[in-house]
Amino acid sequence: MPQQGKVVAVTGASGYIGSKLLECLELEPDLRKIVAFDINPLQRPIHNIAFYRKNVSDPIDDELNDYDVTTLVHLAFNPYRSASRREMNEIREENLETLRAVMASCARTRVTHLIYLSSHTVYGSHSDNPIPILDDAPMRPSTNDHNAFDKQYCEILLQEFSQAQSDIKVTVLRSCTVLGSGSDKAAIDTYFKPWLLGITAYNPPLQFVYDADLARVMSIFVQREIPGIFNVAGDGIVHYREMAKITNNKIVSLPPFLAYPLVQLCQRVRLQPEATASNLNQVRWPILMSTGKLHQATGYRFYHTALDALTAFANSTYLYQDPDPF
């Protein structure tokens, strides 16, 4: 007699989002088992889990078959960026090869549902962006936003996979920036700087989603096996200058004809090597997503607003910062 309850696998399980998802799935009574993969150890103990420290660019067929996994959430993604174009291309190929390997393992096993966490940045920051952007809008990543291009290429692979494997449902969740009570290093590096560059007369609205809300959304898709592409963002917005005040950042506002050359100079002299023209484009032309399709499909109502997410993140991050490092 077959065992009752769904078995779900999670790649990138030790990362910021992966850890939040595991905590959420651990509380689901209808899940029989969680099978987790990461090259790093888990951040905390999780009940009812089989954990494998391995790179999922290698086949995971045996592990998926051993536990009769039917749903897989793919979170493994290398967001690191270097000033070296060669290294950036290597990272892109790494992300694509990892997804190809995971999809191949899904096709060879009993997996019937594949969930992928993408990003709102695939829409790009453009002067003609509709407000809000619907889930079926074309992907147009901003120039120099290499992570966004990686996500776009991954989504194209998933589209091809979905067409070739009609018996496997594919879900893509395009999430805005994820914040909360955690201390994700990428978010800290982005929102806690000595100063932020602004564009004169621009104060764009921003969307954030609380990390626990995103985990609950993913859990709903795991349980209900809903295919398709969905925008994910918390309710409400936070304006750019309000964000700077909450995170205790100073904004240097310049007109565009001065701001763009300054960003290029800062990048060239390694003062802020991660800053690019696409960052300024986001200040001028924000990406505001519609979440109507998500609400209609799931009925989920977010526990936290965008302001809640930013405030919780700011408060928790202050606790990790040394007020007198010298």
Image (cartoon, rainbow, N blue to C red):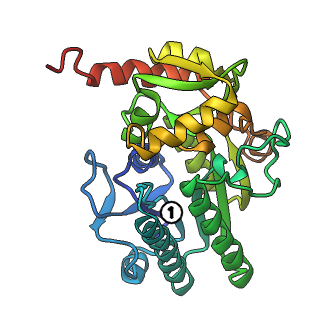
Nearer the observer, 210 or 267? 267
**x%, y% of residue 32?**
44, 60
**Left or right of 299: which side holds 74?**
left
The residue beneath circle 1 is: 74
Nearer the observer, 70 or 77? 77
Q: Residue at x 65, y 62 (%)?
A: 152
**x%, y% of residue 46?**
30, 49
Say if residue 213 shows up in the picture: no
Query: Is residue 276 depicted above or below 103 in this figure?
Result: above
Q: Residue furthest bottom?
A: 108
Q: Residue at x 81, y 43 (%)?
A: 133
Packing grade of label 1 (10 A; few <14, some 14-19, many >=20) is many
Query: Is residue 108 depicted above or below 131 in this figure?
Result: below
Nearer the observer, 47 or 273? 273
Say if residue 53 shows up in the picture: yes
Query: Is residue 107 depicted above or below 292 in this figure?
Result: below
Quadrant position of the C terminus in the picture: top left
**x%, y% of residue 37?**
35, 65
Which secondary structure lies at badge 1? strand
Total number of numbered labels?
A: 1
Picture quadrant of residue 240: top right
At label 1, which amino acid type do we have?
Answer: His
**x%, y% of residue 198?**
60, 24
Q: Residue at x 46, y 49 (%)?
A: 25
